[in-house]
Every structure is written in structure tokens, then in C-alpha cells.
Amino acid sequence: MVFYLSVSAGVGDIKNLLKMGLGYPIRNVLLANDLSSVMDFLLTVLDEARNASIDPGHVGIYFGLGILLYFMFLSSKNPALVRYSAICAVCIGTAYGILNEIFQMFLSYRVASVADAFSNLIGLVLAQIFVVLFALMLRAILKVKKKEPNAQ
């Protein structure tokens, strides 16, 4: 799926669908709850990302790939891969992203770019941060539940 989305000529249509399908409902909820400052912050972040040539589509695709890679390495029988799941996910995902960009040099309807490879890396790193924070939060919740006495 990652390969198809990366080399597909119609990725822009998917981005527009996500923007319209997700963007407007989020904006409406923020405005309805008088959180226009949050909306302004999000718009500023998106503008800065666009100015830095960061592609949100690539970030999102490789965010998903990064989470899948993390859990794949976490379920390995090799203790080193389990211990360094996040690092392995970033390294393997980055290598795949670079190879994908090299492949795009041979397609007449796609252009390889360093900005896309950097966007891929950002998505992979954000995925690992998300997974590690989620695991730490889950561990803290389980620790608190374990300390609570059973009230029956």
C-alpha cells in the first residue's frame, strides 16, 4: 500500500479527500467550541510545513508504516530487534523511503525529491515517538491499577 501511494499519480486526489473529509469537520468542532486559537495554531503549523517543503501526505503514509514496522520488530524472536524496535523501524523505513524515491526517478510521471524523503523520515520518527509515549502511558496506567486494592 505504501509503495502504491508513493508512486501513484493520483496521490493528490487522496490528499484533497483527506483535507476536505477531515479538515472541515475538525474546523467546525473547534469553532463551535470557541477554540479558534487552536485552529489558528494548526493552520500556522501546516503553513510552516508547506514552506519547509514537508509533504503531509508522505508524513501520514510513513507514520502508518512506522507503527506497523515497530510492532513487527516488537514481535520478533530476536531480542535485539525487540529491544531496539523503534530504531530499527526508523532505519528500515528510511531505507525503504530512499529506495522508493530512487525508483521514482525512473517514472515519467513522478519526480524524486529529497523533501519527500525527509517527509518520510519525519513520519517515521513521529510514529516512534507516538508509540513510545503510548507504551509509557499504558505502563503508568497499569501500574496505578495494580496498586489499587480490589474493592468488592
Image (spheres, rainbow, N blue to C red):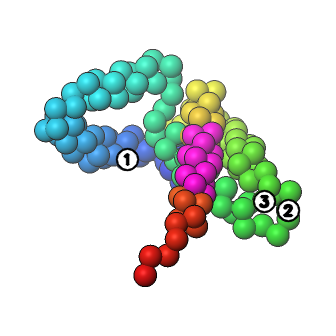
Rendered residue at 43%/19% (across/down): 48
- Whether tag 3 and tag 1 are in contact, CB under 8 A, the answer is no
- Whether tag 2 and tag 3 are in contact, CB under 8 A, the answer is yes
Local crowd at mark 1 within 10 Å, few (<14), some, or many (≥20)?
few
Measured as percent of width and height from the top left, residue 71 is found at 65, 61
Local crowd at mark 3 within 10 Å, few (<14), some, or many (≥20)?
some
Q: CA distance from mark 3 to mark 1?
A: 34 Å
Whether the magenta-drawn stretch holds residue 136 is answered as: yes
What amino acid type should be assigned to the residue bearing mark 2?
Pro
Horizontal side of residue 149 vs 24, given as left or right = right
Q: Is residue 17 visible?
A: yes
Position of the C terminus, as image quadrant, is bottom left
Local crowd at mark 2 within 10 Å, few (<14), some, or many (≥20)?
few
Measured as percent of width and height from the top left, residue 61 is found at 52, 47
Disc sitting over residue 14 in the figure: 1
Q: Please name the residue that numbered disc 2 is placed on.
A: 79
What amino acid type should be assigned to the residue bearing mark 3?
Val
Q: Nearer the viewer, mark 3 or mark 1?
A: 3
Give whichever of 138, 69 is nearer the camera: 138
Horizontal side of residue 88 vs 151, given as left or right = right
Q: Please name the residue that numbered disc 3 is placed on.
A: 82
Measured as percent of width and height from the top left, residue 8 is found at 49, 48
Q: CA distance from mark 2 to mark 3?
A: 5 Å
Measured as percent of width and height from the top left, residue 116 is found at 57, 32
Identify the secondary structure beneath mark 1: helix
Horizontal side of residue 102 vs 144, given as left or right = right
The region drawn magenta spans: 125-140
Q: Earlier in the sequence, mark 2 or mark 1?
A: 1
What amino acid type should be assigned to the residue bearing mark 1?
Ile
Disc sitting over residue 147 in the figure: none
Q: Is residue 108 visible?
A: no
